[in-house]
Image: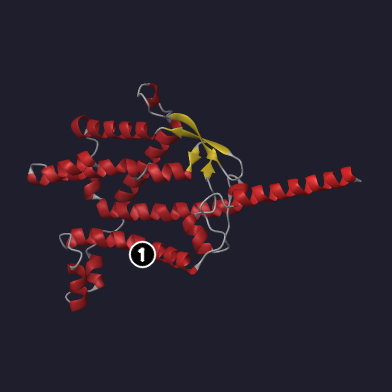
């Protein structure tokens, strides 16, 4: 009798521990199960206004010599209407779409198909195939860490083109700046939409999904912990670190090239931007 009771208590403790482990794993990563009003309001603000804020800054530089106040003054005083400002804004072009498509495709190629070699000769650099943290579902994903290599290859080709091949002008980013902005926004919303659809119909790991029941929160914050396509293409690692971050220094170089083209020299401030960023 005593042995039976002890066995029963042991099983109850085991079940309780299992439930606690499950509950702990469910709350390990930073996504709420329930959405409060402040979070939802923030989500609406970011989804609706983040692209517009970026556009406002770029438009101010393009049309108002980077003054953030003059556009508002013109609108409030009636000197200009929104349509006047919008009509001066470059639209999405096939050229920009082609440039951006080739850019993203090239970065995908470097990410997926070119194994890292930098870790073989750079002391202290951790590259190549590395394991990530254990997910709430107990999965340990592997990553090909080759971002530095992608940056080096990309910039080596950029300088080779600028000084030898001349396939395209080094000012190509500056010359297509606002149309490229539209391309980046289209890709951002397209990837977010695809990631959400994927989480419902073909998630990488169903146990690493977290649904709140709120469409807008799930859309903004993501449902899958590590959305992937195939074995190596990790959405977070790629889109957080490749199309934008690798392009950052190329953007600076393109602006420096445009300054050289227009004024015959590169200013000290532009040199500092390129060195420090």
Task: Say whether residue 226 is left or right of residue 156.
Answer: right
Image quadrant in which the C terminus is located = top left
Question: Most extreme residue toward the left, as rendered?
Answer: 264
Residue 202 shows in this picture: no
From the viewer's side, name the closer residue of 25 and 103. Answer: 25
Q: Residue 133 appears at what percent x and percent y?
A: 52, 39
Q: Residue 146 appears at what percent x and percent y?
A: 40, 32
Task: Say whether residue 86 is left or right of residue 227.
Answer: left
From the viewer's side, name the closer residue of 269 and 182. Answer: 269
> Which residue occupies 36% across, 64% down?
49
From the viewer's side, name the closer residue of 242 and 7. Answer: 7
> Which residue occupies 80% across, 48% down?
9
> Which residue occupies 56% across, 43% down?
135
**As drawn, 78 above or below 8:** below
> Which residue occupies 25% across, 51% down?
177
Residue beneath disc 1: 49
Element type where label 1 sits in the image: helix
Q: Residue 68, located in which quarter of the rendered image? A: bottom left
């Amino acid at each position: 009798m005593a042995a039976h009771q002890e066995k029963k208590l042991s099983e109850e403790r085991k079940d309780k521990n299992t439930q606690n482990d499950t509950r702990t794993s469910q709350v390990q990563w930073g996504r709420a199960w329930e959405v409060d009003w402040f979070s939802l309001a923030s989500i609406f603000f970011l989804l609706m206004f983040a692209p517009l804020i970026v556009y406002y800054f770029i438009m101010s530089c393009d049309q108002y010599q980077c003054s953030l106040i003059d556009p508002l003054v013109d609108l409030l005083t009636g000197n200009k209407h929104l349509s006047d400002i919008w009509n001066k804004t470059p639209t999405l072009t096939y050229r920009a779409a082609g440039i951006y498509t080739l850019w993203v495709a090239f970065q995908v190629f470097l990410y997926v198909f070119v194994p890292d070699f930098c870790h073989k000769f750079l002391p202290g650099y951790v590259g190549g195939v590395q394991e990530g943290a254990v997910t709430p579902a107990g999965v340990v994903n592997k990553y090909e860490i080759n971002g530095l290599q992608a940056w080096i290859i990309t910039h080596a080709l950029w300088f080779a083109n600028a000084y030898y091949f001349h396939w395209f002008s080094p000012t190509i980013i500056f010359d297509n700046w606002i149309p490229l902005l539209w391309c980046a926004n289209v890709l951002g919303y397209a990837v977010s939409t695809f990631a959400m659809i994927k989480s419902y119909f073909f998630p990488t790991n169903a146990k690493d999904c977290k649904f709140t029941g709120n469409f807008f929160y799930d859309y903004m914050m993501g449902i899958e912990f590590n959305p992937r396509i195939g074995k190596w293409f990790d959405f977070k690692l790629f889109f957080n670190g490749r199309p934008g971050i690798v392009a950052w220094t190329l953007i600076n170089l393109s602006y420096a090239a445009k300054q050289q083209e227009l004024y015959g020299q590169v200013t000290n401030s532009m040199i500092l931007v390129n060195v420090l960023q």
